[in-house]
Image: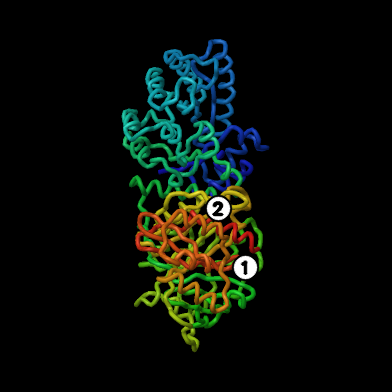
Amino acid sequence: MRTSIATVSLSGSLTEKLTAAARAGFDGVEIFENDLLASPLAPEEIRARCADLGLTVDLYQPMRDIEAVPEEQFARNLRRARHKFALMGRLGADTVLVCSSVSPLAEADDALAAEQLSRLADLAQDFGVRVAYEALAWGRHVSTYDHAWRIVETAGHPALGTCLDSFHILSRSTGPEDLDGIEDIPGEKIFFLQLADAPPLGMDVLQWSRHHRCFPGQGGFDVAGLVRRVLRTGYAGPLSLEVFNDVFRQAEAGPTAVDARRSLLVLQEEVGIADLPAPTAPTGIAFTELVTRDAEPVTALLGRLGFTRTARHRGKPVELWEQGDARILVNTGPAAPADSRRRSGGRTPVDGTTLAAIGLESPDPAAAARRAEALLAPVLPRRRAAEDAPLDAVAAPDGTELFLCATGRPATPNWRADFVDLPHTAAGPRDLRVDHVALTQPWHHFDEAVLFHRAVLGLAARESVDVADPYGLLRSRAVSNADGGVRFPLTVGAAPGDGTAHARHIALATDDVVAAARRFTEAGGRLLPIPANYYDDLAARFPFEDGELETYRALGILYDRDEHGAFRHCYTHTVGRVFFELVQRDAGHQGYGAANAPVRLAAQHAVR
């Protein structure tokens, strides 16, 4: 189906918004009146600009407080409408959005509303314009889609139809049965369909609408269920996004438009009207790649964790360090990929060690790459020698390179073959594996990151968790595959800058965290010191075996438990922008120690 986006959903000038929409692949736009009024371009110039970009102007919006008002006020409304309809002709728009009135002058009189909307449609028809009447969830007298449809049906005018808006409908819905009436509306009388998702919030619906909408698939609404019902009516117009969101309107327009378009592609796949390559979820972590200008601090830390340098890339300054099933590449080449710099606002990342890339074990790397490209995550160009394995990589919204790998599988490119083995001796027990990789996100790309990992990579998103930091509030949401072989907790701060203020970390699973912590400290490593008050509280919350809590206190091991079992973990000091976590997870435990995060964050702030 054709896709459209309201200019209010993007940041920047109207010209910048149009360019971003076109580059993301949208077919059309809704012109929001404020964007037009603030533009130095004449309506004819905007129309020409849209045509040059391959965009249609699908809707002009909004006209407010039109219907069910005293006659003298309605006369003034018609005068205003006449001007707007003439302007729409210059703009090339043939449909106008009319919102249900919130005016204190409006009367609870459906017959009057129908009569005045019919007269408005008479005038619109003279200008070649259609009127799409929409029920605002906070409308004074008309606040539901079925009420708006009854008024339109009563008016019975060919130039008057209804606009269905998923936010206004779903924010008031108490169950699927509330949507059943949609299929009673003839498809030709649904003049427009606007889509937005939103997180479940307990707040005034107007504030919810104006500040917290998001793209489909990023919230908690059943947008797909609504769209299925609309399509069954025979609706043939565009799927259009109208998203009011404070974060989106401050973020760069281009990436936001791509995120928006991706959400519609996923939505169309979900409702069965788009045929995309099937998701190919990763099965494990092949490697994590650290980039650093000075390898000594991080390699010393790896050595104390029991890692051994086992191989070196044949043509690049990259070394492979291994411990058990955990593999870490240490790259002393360029500091960061270009896309990472772009998504961080053009700033070059700070000096020191950074987590730049992750290798994902994939059952079919080529199929995973096709899925990524179809969802607007193009495969990144790579500099490689002729003999190097032809690995595909895509950029996550935060700029992290995600390599699609197959390690040591026949007839599949093997990244490990690019490395020359080095003489080495294993340093003690080799029982580590990657439990999860925690990725902090730029504050304005958090919802995009969740959708990306879910839709492009085929990971499942868990519930969002708020974590108290000594200097603010962090929001975290984990994504993972079915068996937990791939886990990414995604974290962001509540304001600009917060998300980049926290280092990323690699969590290494072990069957005995006490033994692993002791080996680390005996090798000269330093674990993050945890305040005594924390252990006093643990003693009150959980029963422990004799001496168990004292051991945790001595080593700095934190503890959490749910109905599935315990989670024991401890942290190294930070090197550059990276630290490590040692984890012992009982089978079935799905958490990440969120209850302990405030203590960990405070301890990290204390040792900076």
Query: Looking at the image, which residue sits at the far front?
Result: 546
Identify the mark at residue 141; answer none if there is no mark.
none
For this orientation, the residue located farthest to the top is 71
**Colour approach in the figure:** rainbow
Asked if residue 128 can be seen in this view, the reply is no
Circle 2 packing at 10 Å, graded few (<14), some (14-19), many (20+), is: many
- Neighbour tally class for label 1: few under 14, some 14-19, many 20 plus, Cα within 10 Å: some
Q: Residue furthest right?
A: 40
Determine the residue positioned at 40% across, 68% down: 361
Of labels 1 and 2, earlier in sequence is 2
Can you say whether 463 is above or below 151 in the image? below
Residue farthest to the bottom, as pictured: 423
Residue 170 in picture, x, y percent from top left = 41, 35
Q: Nearer the viewer, residue 74 or 553?
A: 553
Please state which of residues 588 and 133 is positioned toward the viewer in this rendering.
588
Q: Is residue 513 above or below residue 179?
A: below
Element type at mark 2: strand
Q: Which residue is mark 2?
A: 492
Q: Amino acid at mark 2?
A: Val
Give whichever of 358, 20 is nearer the camera.
358
* Residue in the image at 55% along x and 38% along y: 211
Q: In x, y percent, where is residue 32?
A: 56, 34
Q: Quadrant of the C terminus?
A: bottom right
Q: Give the residue drawn at x 51%, y 31%.
A: 204
Label 1: element kind: loop
Q: Amino acid at mark 1?
A: Gly
- Return the residue nearer the eye: 477 or 34: 477
- Can you tell which mark lies on residue 576? 1
Quarter of the view holding residue 144: top left
Image quadrant containing the N terminus: top left
Where is residue 88, by image quadrant?
A: top right
